[in-house]
Image: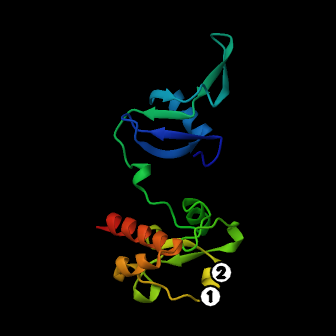
Amino acid sequence: MHPHHSHVLQLDIQGTPQAWISLEHAALHVATGSVAWVDGDGPLATLRGGFNVARGRQSVIDVHPIIALHGASKVNLFDVVPAFSKGKLFRRDRLTCAYCGQSFNERDLQCEHIVPESRGGGWTWMNLVTACRLYRSKALPVHDVSEWNPRREARRGSIRTRNRYQLALRVRKETQ
């Protein structure tokens, strides 16, 4: 889950994620004594500081992958909705088409609205699914899932229908 390997996850004292920070930023927290506790498998890096003449050695700061700071929290990083992107949507859906249930290369996939844009459906995580080009190119009627009749659709019994219905239930549950 690291966005970059040389970044440190900063937590508040309760362990709530606050931000990804640089090694240097983390070292500053360590040096100023604002770190309450650390976590992760040993130090991510050891930074060498100035030379301490009195002790006759260089100061060394160990920076761990996860640091918790004293003081009040500002934000829960995991409450923040990540910015939408096609790539993230395809990874969320495991590169699988919501219609046919087959897996594809990313270049052969597209974003499909559940509630169409024309009906006010937005470009949001809960209103988009991954669709293969085949289904998009056939210009199949786009179902507005909010008006779906699962009994009628279930009689058709296709994988596409079942996937769509399960998705509709999930969306309905999460948006209530």
- Image point (57%, 30%), residue name: 64
Q: Nearer the viewer, residue 101 or 153?
A: 153
Residue 134 visible in the current orientation: yes
Whether 119 is drawn above or below 73: the answer is below
Q: Nearer the viewer, residue 76 or 96?
A: 96
Q: Position of residue 148 (x, y in %)?
A: 37, 80
- Image point (52%, 67%), residue name: 84
Q: At numbered mark 1, what does the secondary structure look like: helix, strand or loop?
A: loop
Residue 124 visible in the current orientation: no
**Left or right of residue 24: residue 161:** left
Q: Position of residue 157 (x, y in %)?
A: 47, 74
**Left or right of residue 97: residue 120:** left
- Quadrant for the C terminus, please: bottom left
Quadrant of the rendered image containing residue 165: bottom left
Quadrant of the rendered image containing residue 68: top left
Whether 1 is drawn above or below 31: the answer is below
Q: Residues within 10 Å of mark 1 (few under 14, many from 20)?
A: few
The amino acid type, in three-letter code, at marker 1 is Lys
Q: At numbered mark 2, what does the secondary structure look like: helix, strand or loop?
A: helix
Instruction: Please name the residue that numbered disc 1 is placed on.
Output: 138
Q: Mark 2 and mark 1 in contact (Cβ < 8 Å)?
A: yes
Residue 134: which disc? 2
Q: Residue furthest top?
A: 55
